[in-house]
Every structure is written in C-alpha cells, then in structure tokens.
Amino acid sequence: MSNIELQDKRPLSPHLSIYKPIPTMVMSIMHRITGVALYFGTFLFAWWLFAAAAAPAYFEWVNAFFASWFGRLVLFGYTWALMHHLAGGLRHFMWDTGRGFDKHFSTKLAWATLAFSVSTTILLWIIAYAVR
C-alpha cells in the first residue's frame, strides 16, 4: 500500500466542530477564560495601588477612570469573572473529591455556576452602591 492510501484510511481525531456544546463543557471553558481575565485584571488592581502610592493627583486620575462608565463596566466584568471563577473552582474542587460526576447533576451544577456568578455579581454591586 502506498502512503496516500494509508493516509486516506486513517481515522480522524475528534475536533470541537463535531461536538455539541453542553453546559458542563461551556462552563469549563469559561472557567479557563475567566482565569485569564483575572490575570490581566490584576494589572488594573496593581495600577490602582501604584497610583495610590505615587501621587494624589495621579490617584485621582486613576479613580476618575474607574468611576467612568467604561471603568465601571470593566470593574463589573472583573467582578463577574471573579465570582464565576470562584464558582467554577468550587465545582472542580468537588470533582476532585470524586463527587458530582452524574450527567444530570453535573449539568445542573454547570447552570448553578452561571446563576451563582451572575446573582452574586449583581448582589455585590447593589451592596457596594448602598454602602457608598
């Protein structure tokens, strides 16, 4: 047999394009994405700390940025990423203990992760505005 005939008969490896996205898979991918977002969001926190140590005028400028509509949107997204990553981390921790692998339970847990992250983000922002 020639190489061309062998290549035609080789099985293809499964790829994301043939899988139907399920909630568990989507939430695991979102857990990774929020981890990366938190990594870059930490630079914003470091920028704020640097401004606080640098000079009062620079600190006021950075605070004005975070008080703008765009800054608040970034902070809201950072809060959601933090809450989602927390919930996903707890879900993965539960799996590390050997629990929660049932198909229906893990799907409900994936939806609960999303519900927890959205609701706690909104609740935290409501509390922050009430305390402010």
Image: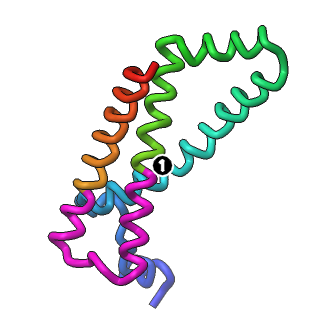
Residue located at (40% from left, 51% from top): 30
Question: On screen, 2 above or below 69?
Answer: below
Our reading of the magenta stretch's main secondary structure is helix
Residue located at (52% from left, 11% from top): 68
Q: Which residue is mark 1?
A: 33
Find the magenta span and give its range: 85-110
Q: Is residue 126 left or right of residue 36?
A: left
Residue 6 is one of the magenta-drawn residues? no
Q: Secondary structure at mark 1?
A: helix
- Residue reaching furthest to the front: 131
Q: Position of residue 119 (x, y in %)?
A: 28, 40
Viewer-proximal residue, 99 or 125?
Answer: 125
Q: Is residue 71 left or right of residue 97?
A: right
Type of amino acid at the residue the image marks with label 1: Ile
Quadrant in the picture for the N terminus: bottom left
Residue located at (82% from left, 25% from top): 53
Q: Is residue 55 left or right of residue 107?
A: right
Q: Position of residue 37 (x, y in %)?
A: 54, 42
Viewer-proximal residue, 71 or 120?
Answer: 120
